[in-house]
Image (cartoon, rainbow, N blue to C red):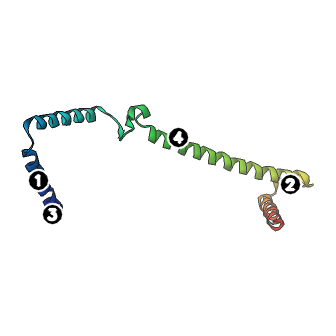
């Protein structure tokens, strides 16, 4: 770090010696131009692209980037929820159609092992699909 400080100090001394050789009129013009540049920099509230003009953050609404990210996250979460709901609806429709197609006695619906039977039915349907591929 001391090498950087030493370099900065020597650079400052060289620039000071160079400005001592500039006449008073040129020095005043450079000072005025510097003040104008600083005032423009203070008034611009946004990003400045060299050669393309300034883009103010006001034109983007200030928090537009965060708002866009939040909206994208919300759309993604809602989309994933509906996709999952759609998959569950398809699965339930398959079970319902299998139940309606078979002649299942009414007591099967009240039976405690009915959920196990549904799982077995689902597993056998999944194994049939995988064997067909």
Q: Earlier in the sequence, mark 3 or mark 4?
A: 3
Q: CA distance from mark 4 to mark 2?
A: 41 Å
State the mark number for residue 4. Answer: none
- Name the front one of labels 1 and 4: 1
For image coordinates 83% across by 50% down, the residue present is 96
Kindly identify which residue carries mark 1: 14
Between 61 and 23, the one nearer to me in the picture: 23
* Crowding at mark 3 (Cα within 10 Å: few <14, some 14-19, many 20+): few
Q: CA distance from mark 1 to mark 4?
A: 54 Å
State the mark number for residue 71. Answer: 4
- Name the front one of labels 2 and 3: 3
Measured as percent of width and height from the top left, residue 84 is found at 67, 50
Residue located farthest toward the right when viewing the structure as drawn: 103
Q: Earlier in the sequence, mark 1 or mark 2?
A: 1
State the mark number for residue 98. Answer: 2
Element marked by disc 4: helix
Q: CA distance from mark 3 to mark 1?
A: 18 Å
Q: Quadrant of the N terminus?
A: bottom left
* Crowding at mark 4 (Cα within 10 Å: few <14, some 14-19, many 20+): few
Which of the 4 image quadrants contains residue 105?
bottom right
Q: CA distance from mark 1 to mark 2?
A: 89 Å
Element marked by disc 3: helix
Kindly identify which residue carries mark 3: 2
């Amino acid at each position: 770090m001391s090498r950087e400080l030493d370099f900065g100090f020597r650079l400052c001394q060289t620039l000071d010696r160079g400005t001592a050789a500039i006449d008073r009129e040129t020095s005043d013009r450079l000072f005025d131009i510097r003040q104008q540049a600083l005032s423009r920099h203070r008034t611009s509230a946004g990003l400045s692209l060299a050669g393309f003009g300034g883009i103010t953050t006001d034109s983007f609404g200030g928090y537009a980037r965060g708002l866009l990210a939040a909206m994208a996250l919300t759309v993604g979460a809602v989309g994933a929820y509906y996709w999952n709901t759609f998959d569950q609806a398809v699965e339930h429709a398959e079970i319902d159609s299998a139940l309606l197609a078979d002649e299942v006695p009414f007591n099967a619906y009240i039976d405690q092992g009915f959920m196990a039977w549904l799982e077995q039915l689902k597993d056998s349907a999944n194994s049939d699909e995988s064997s067909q591929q």
